[in-house]
Amino acid sequence: MTRHIVSVLVANNSGVLSRVSGLFSRRGYNIDSVSSGETEDPAVSRLTIVVRGDYNVLEQIEKQLNKLVDVIKVAALDESSSVCRELLLVKVKAHEANRAAISEIVDIFRARIIDVASESLIVEITGAESKLTAFLDLMQKYDIREIARTGITALGRGNDALRDEVN
């Protein structure tokens, strides 16, 4: 199944995310990830939803989303012509003997250590999903204690903006 990234501009009202996720669950579509946040206009939020399916599934999702009252604009983003990023926080077990090795890996991946405790470190890393996966693969041997991921956030490349298509 193909992975699709759907960018949705919605009115920044309470319950919108619930109605969108309800639409997916009623139709049996699984959401791989969803991220949501206010845009440059405080009255508008952007949802970035990652789903898997064929072209027909994507087409149905777009049609169903467009029927929701609070939805302003829906667009499928092509990964090759979009900037896609994800944030990952990783708490890894760390002691004096392995802190230097962990720190070297953190530097190579252009990540940051954002918290240091007596027996652990929290690392923040952003980037493409493949970069985060490679980082996690290397961190496995250091005993990962916790992981938090934001899911993909994406914007189309170039001068055009999704909001321009609304007006």
Image: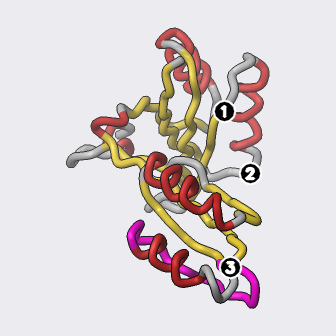
Write down the residue under mark 3: 94
Relative to 42, does residue 59 appear above or below in the rendering? above
**Mark drawn on residue 31:** 1
Residue at horizontal 71 percent and vertical 65 percent from the top: 143
Q: Which of 151 and 39 is in front in this view?
A: 151
Q: Which of 74 and 96 is in front in this view?
A: 96
What kind of residue is marked 3?
Ala
155 left or right, relative to 151:
left
**Mark drawn on residue 14:** 2
Sequence-wise, which precedes: disc 1 or disc 3? 1
Q: Judging from the image, what secondary structure is the residue with disc 1 in?
A: strand
The residue sitting at the top extreme is 56
Confirm whether the magenta stretch covers residue 110. yes
Q: Judging from the image, what secondary structure is the residue with disc 2 in?
A: loop
Confirm whether the magenta stretch covers residue 133. no
What kind of residue is marked 2?
Ser
Disc 2 + disc 3, Cβ < 8 Å = no
Q: Nearer the viewer, mark 2 or mark 1?
A: 1
23 left or right, relative to 71:
right
Sequence-wise, which precedes: disc 2 or disc 1? 2
Query: Could you say which quadrant of the image residue 25 lies in?
Result: top right
Q: Which of marks 1 and 3 is in front?
A: 3
Estimate the x, y position of residue 50 in percent, counting from the top left. Answer: 56, 35
